[in-house]
Image (tube, rainbow, N blue to C red):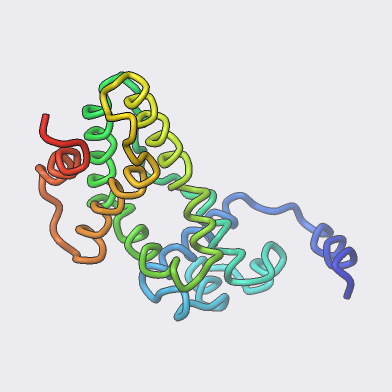
Amino acid sequence: MSSAAETIRRGAGRPRSAEVDRAIGEAALALLIEEGYGGMSVEGIANRAGVGKAAIYRRWSTKAEIVVDALRSHAFAHIPLPDSGDVRADLLEMLTAQQEAFSGPDGPLMNALAAEKSRHPDLRVAFEDAYIRDRRTHLHHILSAAVERGDLPPDADIELLVEAAPAILVHRLVVRAAAPTPDLPQRIVDLLLGPA
């Protein structure tokens, strides 16, 4: 069947239900956490969501499409994007909120994505779109503004700082599976920007 005919076929019939879409997305993310991307299946998603496989295939063609859509519609924990003019305080606020997110309900999902995204580029791109890109762009903005104000040296490696701040946090909490500590965000800020 041609892709045009497939599109027409999928468009026919009952309108999509937002409730069914949500149930499928939640099931996909729950299975991603529990079984990993390689272990989960469309059949497992359908069973978990309480729908038939046909309901899924009317919406998506592959498991990857289901998970990517679920990530894009998932309401990740709110991470503030402060811009107070104090780069140290802003970075500390962002890292503290990110540590709390990893310790809260989104923690298992972010841990699963951290483990799976290197093996599955589709997941990496979706996670970047849903969670990483805005925070990275904002961090670049506040660090660049700090250089312009003279709060950071003119030769500060902004690109490396943008990568390093969250990477240290993720390494400690995900790769090493260390327990969050209240002083970790402050220690990262002091390491990257120097002691106050």
Please determine whether, in this image, residue 179 is positioned above or below residue 40.
above
Please determine whether, in this image, residue 151 is positioned above or below residue 120.
above
Please determine whether, in this image, residue 42 is positioned above or below residue 29.
below
Q: Residue at x 61, y 49 (%)?
A: 18
Q: Residue at x 14, y 46 (%)?
A: 184
Q: Position of residue 127 (x, y in %)?
A: 47, 55
How many marks the image carries: the answer is: 0
**Residue at the front extreme of this rendering:** 155
168 on left or right of 119: left
Question: In which quadrant of the rendered view does residue 83 lie?
Answer: top left
Q: Position of residue 118 (x, y in %)?
A: 44, 69
Q: Position of residue 132 (x, y in %)?
A: 43, 47
51 on left or right of 175: right
148 on left or right of 130: left
Q: Quadrant of the C terminus?
A: top left
Question: In which quadrant of the rendered view does residue 61 lie?
Answer: bottom right
Q: Residue at x 33, y 53 (%)?
A: 106
92 on left or right of 63: left
Q: Nearer the viewer, residue 159 or 37?
A: 159
**Residue at the bottom extreme of this rendering:** 39
Q: Residue at x 39, y 76 (%)?
A: 35
Q: Position of residue 165 (x, y in %)?
A: 28, 46
Q: Quadrant of the N terminus?
A: bottom right
